[in-house]
Amino acid sequence: MTQMKQFAALSVVFGSGALFGLGLTLSGMINPAKVIGFLDLAGNWDPSLLLVMAGGLAVTFPAFQLILKRGAPILEAKFYLPTRKDLDPRLLGGAVLFGLGWGIAGLCPGPALAALTLLNGQVFLFVAAMVAGMLLHKVLAE
Amino acid sequence: MVRIESEQVYIPEGLKHMENFTPVSAIAGGLLIGVAATLMLLVYGRIAGISGILGGILFPLQGETLWRVIFLVGLVAGAAVYPLISATSVQWTAQTGSIGMVIAGLLVGFGTRMGSGCTSGHAICGIARISKRSFAATGVFMVTAVITVYVLRHLSGLVI
């Protein structure tokens, strides 16, 4: 890839990240109270998270179908997509563990990183533990 | 830029207890997230899955680190800019104590690596690719989180 193309691609990557962070914050998903408000069906239910997902999918669902018909992305040689197709115990077990953590704190990786901007000690604690969990998985998986 | 002064929307009488529901900002924020993930795939061919991007920085592969760092710097920058361009302040309320934060963080970090993704990679990007694995993972982590919240808040009285 030429340097010019590389620079353009990474500028778009930065813009994509910025839009993502903006969207997480605007949607309120950065706030654990909004997430727990959705997950707590028996409490004072807040369906906002459902509409965040619906808003996201309203764009990605049609767009991804069209994009993946292309031979390649605009500024890269190929698509980098997951290749596995089967439902294995690791996928489902991992989703259970993630769901447990999500239900305890109301934080998933994107909102947790976006919330670092609040300079709150509790967020730092969660993100440090999340990174430790990722490293632990790496150690145990080998 | 997006500016939502206040969110006075019509809520039917039967749903009046949903006073925390913010449909306008939720849809607008969701659309932004969708555009972000679409740009990423269309231009750079990558999936905007946050746990995969962060995990990829922790265990770097040749040539696959810089874009990940730039994406996450962008994500934090976007969140940092929000209060400057919005009329509303960012609300953030912890739902558990320090011990809960550590336990939850470990579970989220470990679980998202083991399960190959989180809310963004599976629920926003994977479902859009009509991936069977992402449909299954999204269903499992949603149901598990709902049960976890129910048990912690309505059955056990245990606050961690």
Image (tube, rainbow, N blue to C red):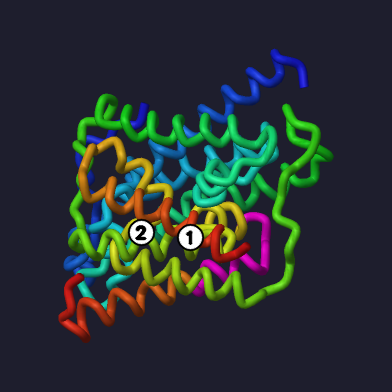
Left or right relative to A43: residue A24: right
Query: Closer to the camera, A136 or B48?
Result: A136
Q: Position of residue A31 (x, y in %)?
A: 27, 51
**Amino acid residing under circle 2:** Gly
- Residue B132 on the magenta span: yes
Task: Kindly state the secondary structure of the residue where label 1 is placed.
Answer: helix
Disc number for residue A136: 1
Q: Position of residue B72 (x, y in %)?
A: 47, 36
- Few, some or many residues within 10 Å of mark 2 (<14, 14–19, 20+): many
Residue appearing at x 61%, y 41% in the figure: B60
Q: Magenta: predominant secondary structure element?
A: helix
Which residue is disc 2 drawn over? B105
Is residue B24 in sight in this rendering? Answer: no
Left or right relative to A3: residue B154: left
Query: Closer to the camera, B112 or B47?
Result: B112
Task: Tell me the subunit letter for badge 2.
Answer: B
Query: Closer to the camera, A117 or B113?
Result: B113
Where are the magenta residues, as a range? B128-140
